[in-house]
Image (cartoon, helix red, strand yellow):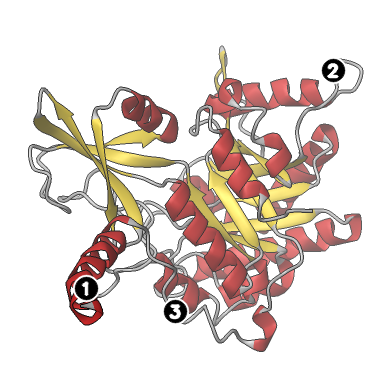
Amino acid sequence: MTKLKTLLLLPLLVLIAFFVFLLLPPKLPFSPLSSPLPSHSTPLSSYTVLGFLPYWNLKKLSSDSLPALTSLAYFALQLDESGNLVSHLNPREEEPGYTNYKRMTKCLDPSLSPCPFPSLILTFVSEDSPALSSLLDSPSARQTAIHTILSLITESQSIGVNIDFEPLGSPPPSTRQNFTLFIQELATELMPRHLHLSVSIYPSAASRLRLWDLSALAPSVDQFVVMTYDYTLPGDDKTGPNAPLRGAGYLFEHDVLTNLAEISKLIPPSIILLGIPLYGYEWKVNDSTKYVATSSRGAVASLARIQELINTNSLEILWDRTTLTPYAIRRENGVVVSQIYYENLDSIKLKLELVKSAGLGGIAFWALGYEGSNPSLWSLISSLNPN
């Protein structure tokens, strides 16, 4: 009788295990960056938690996020082709990044109000691609840019800078070499002052000819922010994940694990910050199939918007086991109207596990203000530095 009960119970247990397998996010798979770790990739005792705050989200910054951050990067101040700060769009209109920078520096002035921000970093971008080439290729423009950066660091009482130069396509070798020279020249001024220097890079920086010569830059840079998002773009011809942990070679050309493995061959993992998006993309479709073809351009879907849709019970939340990311089907009156690919607590937790197992230096969020009211998120992030 006992044997019969066991035989009857076994199919039920298998069925339960199958549904658990389908519904629960899987553990992080083995990868080139997980066990066994290289000797220089031991987990750190503390991690950087960097939050980028774009000027257009300044009023959306949540106080819930601040205790979880180790530093906050204001985005962004523009440099023109001569290395000067772009303060005006025209004689009557200030450049909005500069306008909001001034608002932040007022907050940083103790005589006006106590500063609520963690250690402040200023992000610098180029005015456009032609201006970037002109700036980098001119020794005098590079020196002017360095002087501009140092002046604004002093004025804002910031702890350092993030350089986020993103030229389109593959730059000529001379521009690539001059960018390395610029970073080396900038580091020469920052290091004696104990000021921080980070550089933002594309996740494909080690697999394609990009602006960043990682091996040459590493001795001068404190941290590299790897922008591991936008793997599927709004204009792509099919829906897909924003930051897939895996899937390269099967459905996508790249994924986070593959890109980090490539990058870590050129620079120490301990100076890599893993980019985590607080947004996704939504495409109008009439099909619930994964990676379905699109007929129109997608739109940014912040985590705040996604939570609003969840609260109205208009989303079916699903889990993509191929990429280890969530996605959602949106319906109106029972009819599929869109798909959203994004990040949630489960996928972010997997990325935090990757940071620890791979000995990375920490994480960087793009962008603060997109998460809405989300105390659970910041509680999860705080677990990265429990002390």
Q: Vertical placement of 347 versus 79: above or below?
A: below
Q: Residues within 10 Å of mark 3 (few under 14, many from 20)?
A: some
Q: How much space separates mark 2 and mark 3, taking CA atoms?
A: 48 Å
Residue at figure coordinates x 48%, y 60% from the top left: 350
The image quarter in which residue 353 lies: bottom right
Q: Residues within 10 Å of mark 2 (few under 14, many from 20)?
A: few
Reading the image, the residue beneath label 3 is: 31
Residue 292 seen in the figure: yes
State the image coordinates of residue 317 (x, y, percent, origin top left). 28, 42
State the image coordinates of residue 293 (x, y, percent, origin top left). 10, 49
Reading the image, the residue beneath label 1 is: 5
Foreground of the two, 155 or 65: 65
Position of 123 compared to 236: left or right? right
State the image coordinates of residue 286 (x, y, percent, origin top left). 7, 37
Q: Amino acid at mark 1?
A: Lys
User: Is there a contact, CB below 8 Å, between mark 2 and mark 3?
Assistant: no
The image quarter in which residue 65 lies: top right
Secondary structure under tag 3 reads loop
Q: Quadrant of the N terminus?
A: bottom left
Secondary structure under tag 2 reads loop
Task: Name which of mark 1 and mark 2 comes first in the sequence.
Answer: 1
Secondary structure under tag 1 reads helix
Q: How much space separates mark 3 and mark 1, taking CA atoms?
A: 41 Å
User: Is there a contact, CB below 8 Å, between mark 3 and mark 1?
Assistant: no
Between marks 2 and 3 in the image, the one whose residue lies nearer the viewer: 3
Between marks 3 and 1 in the image, the one whose residue lies nearer the viewer: 1
Q: Amino acid at mark 3?
A: Ser
Position of 120 compared to 342: left or right? right
Residue at figure coordinates x 37%, y 25% from the top left: 308
Reading the image, the residue beneath label 2 is: 113
Task: Name which of mark 2 and mark 3 comes first in the sequence.
Answer: 3
